[in-house]
Every structure is written in structure tokens, then in C-alpha cells.
Image: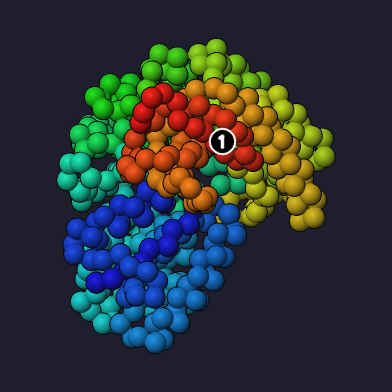
Amino acid sequence: MNFHIISFGCQMNANDSDWLVRALESRGWTEAPEDQARVFIVNTCSVRDKPEQKVYSLLGRLEQHARRDANVFAAVGGCVAQQVGRGFFERFPFVRLVFGTDAVALAPAALERLAESSDERLALLDFLPTYAEREDPVPGPGSGPAQAFVNIMQGCDNFCAYCIVPYVRGRQKSRDPGAVLAECRSLAARGVREITLLGQNVNSFGLDNGGAGVSFAQLLRQVADIPGVERLRFTTSHPKDIAGEVVAAFGELPNLCPALHLPLQSGSDAMLQRMGRRYDTARYLDIVERLRRARPDIALSTDLIVGFPGESEADFQATLDMIRRVGFESSFSFKYSDRPGVAAARMKPKVSEEVAAARLEHLQNLQNTLTKDCLEKCVGTLTVVLIEGPSRKQDAGALSWRGRDPAGRTVNLAHDGGADLTGKMVPVRLVEAKKHSLVGEKAGASW
């Protein structure tokens, strides 16, 4: 059975989609281009309105395949599936499976069942009381990429005023730490060199019943101790929950990468309070100061929202001041959009689209300047790059490769040898800064 997956949204969605590919391939299915697929799987995001609307547009286009071939059908999973549920059946007749965020583990078996039936429809939308473990359809030793993502939790208990995540991913459920460690050991044994721990708020791991009394700081150290794990990362962190032991780990664990994504959302204390973030700018700056004492070379990135209900020009200027003060190396920034059911949807006054768009452009211009400065400071330094594969752009001459340094910066470099560098750790001298990446050249006698 040929299938094609389209994924929207966060890294957790991307990881879920990657697992679905492997799970279906282990059942004999074949991943195929869109024009050769019989089954389409759309993994959705509803954190903002724009990606949700993209889902409807995509399904409208994919429906043309079903009109040409009655055997073609679609499955919709992820956050919009949890939000809209059976409504997809009414709007798009070729959708025959809707699976929510807690039902990813059940989707492969459901798809097999539907492939053998011509008219059945299934909706898997129940939230589960505990984290649902998944089968392990991974390839054998020595195959696969050198980087892997490992889910350590599902859902969120924070209920920030703007955020739909607790409603579409459910309440927080920490994964059993033994299962996390077993997966990490298995990955390392197969040649994975870099592991990223994933969760809506990894810092709160273990605060529910699922963590078996293990804190995130303890789990982090246990994963770092696994032989073969040369690089360790985690995302995403909530500032209110980051423990002193986690901050200290950046200076104590040599394989914990010097990079942290720490969402700020706003630089205004008034906006942070309205957002329900449960920290203020003084606390955030204290965390930044402690992180930089522990690891002076740490690269910080963040999330930012402009145009939140009630945001004044002074509030926006406070956000710009915080961006400059922290010196974020990169950021993801968005205009606020109402999401169904969240507290902020009822808040007034709304900021106009025109004002929000102008603020976003101003903020992103500032961030581009800071990013450029940060990258230029790297020029002339030596680093080690984990190669992810060939660069998207290839110049004439030597093959160009793309990878990341320990801080997660993208580095492109040319190599005139014939060997495949994918998954290799290579010593590199950084020689040029681009807008969002670096250019490196070989350092040392050979690779």
C-alpha cells in the first residue's frame, strides 16, 4: 500500500510523522510521492489559525485524487484532528480516519483495517490517562540517521491564556523514565550520536504520576550517561519550571549542547501576567544570568508573540528591550491569533491586524540584526559539525554538506572527497557568516 504523509507544526508532530512512516513500512507499506499514493496522512497543527487553515486547503486539493480513484482515502491526525474530530467526515468525504494526539500509536493498525474496507470510518479521539507507549519499528544496527528525537511526555498543564495545546493534547502525562532510557540506549546502540528529548514542557517532567518520581534533571543526567550519546538536547522549556539542577547541568555535562530554547513570549510584565505565564522579566533575566555563568557560550533562542490583547506600544517596546538585553541568537515570532476555547479569545481590547503586522516586522528586523551579529562572532573559530546530509544548494565543484555545530547553528561546507559524510562528526573552521547560517572549511589533516 502506497502512502504519503504531510506534517504541519512542531517538532513533536514531525517526530510523530517519522514514527508513522517507520511503523507503516514495517507492515509492508511503501512511502510514495503524492501522485502515487493511495493513502494520505495529514498530521496537523492548531497552535495558530494559519496552519489550521492550511490543513483545510491541503485536504481540498488532495480530494481531487479521491475523485479520480475511489480507493484513495485520507487520515487526519494531530491537534486539528483532536479539535475538529468527526467534523472532518462531513466536510471531506474521502477522510476515513481521524486520530487525536493520544492515538498516534493506534493509527497504523487503524489504517490497515481501513485499507481492507471500502466504506468504514474510524474516529480515535479519546484522551488517555497515561502516556501510550508505541511499538518500536526501527531498522537494525548500523542503519538510520545519527540524530534522533525521543518523546518524554505528552500534553501540558499550564493553560497559558493564548494556548490551545492543553485542549488538543490533553493534560500532562510523563512517560515512564525506564522506557525513555531504554529507547535512548537502543538508539545509541544503533549509531545515533545526538538525542533531543521532546515535550510540551520538559522541565515539568515527573510532576505528574507518570514520571515514577524521577525529575527532569535526573532524567537528563541518566540519558547523558548512556555510552554513545555524544550530543544531548531538549525542547521545549517553560521558564517557570526550569530547575537549578538543569541550569547547573549545562556546566557539568560535557555532552549537553550549549543551546537552549526558552520561550519569553513578551518583555512586558503586564503582558506576561495577562498571558498567565507565571514569571516576570526579572525572573527570566535571572535564569539567563545563571545559564551564562554555567555555560558562557550558550546560545539562547526564544518564542515571541506580538499583538496580544491589550498590548500597548510601551508593552511592545519592553519586548524589544528584552530582546536586546538577552541577545537572543534566534527567535520564532508570531502575531497573536484567537484560538477556540482559550482565555485570551475573550480578552479586550484586540490589537488591529495592521498594528500587529508592523510590530512583527519591526521585531523580526531587530532579530535579524542580532542573529547576524551572533553568527559573525563565530567566524574564525574552530568547531565540530555533525553532518546531516548534502546542502540544499550545491555550487559547482566540490559537493557541499550541511550540518550543525554544538549550539545548533547550521553550517555548510564543501568537501572534495568522495565519501558520504552523513552522520559524521567533522572538525571545521568557520570562515563566513550568512544571514541564517555559517560557512566552514576543513580543519585538520583529514576527515
- Position of the C terminus, as image quadrant, is top left
Q: Is residue 408 visible?
A: no
Q: How many marks?
A: 1
- Work out whether 341 lies above or below 172: below
Along the viewing direction, whichever of 169 and 374 lies nearer the viewer: 374
Along the viewing direction, whichever of 144 and 105 lies nearer the viewer: 144
Along the viewing direction, whichever of 24 and 423 lies nearer the viewer: 423
Q: Is residue 308 left or right of residue 387?
A: right
Along the viewing direction, whichever of 54 and 147 lies nearer the viewer: 147
Q: Which residue is mark 1?
A: 438
Mark 1 residue type: Leu
Q: Position of residue 362 (x, y in %)?
A: 77, 43
- Work out whether 428 lies above or below 67: above
SS at mark 1?
Answer: strand
Q: Position of residue 165 (x, y in %)?
A: 49, 48
- Work out whether 31 lies above or below 429: below
Q: Is residue 237 left or right of residue 229?
A: right
Q: Position of residue 345 (x, y in %)?
A: 65, 53
Q: Where, by quadrant of the figure, is residue 53 drawn?
A: bottom right
Q: Is residue 373 visible?
A: yes
Q: Where, by quadrant of the figure, is residue 41 drawn?
A: bottom left
Q: Is residue 431 left or right of residue 98?
A: right
Name the residue: 22% across, 48% down. 138
- Position of the N terminus, as image quadrant, is bottom left
Name the residue: 23% across, 45% down. 143
Name the residue: 28% across, 78% down. 120
Q: Position of residue 301 (x, y in %)?
A: 57, 33
Q: Residues within 10 Å of mark 1 (few under 14, many from 20)?
A: many
Q: Is residue 390 left or right of residue 316?
A: left
Name the residue: 54% across, 71% down. 57
Q: Where, by quadrant of the figure, is residue 268 drawn?
A: top right
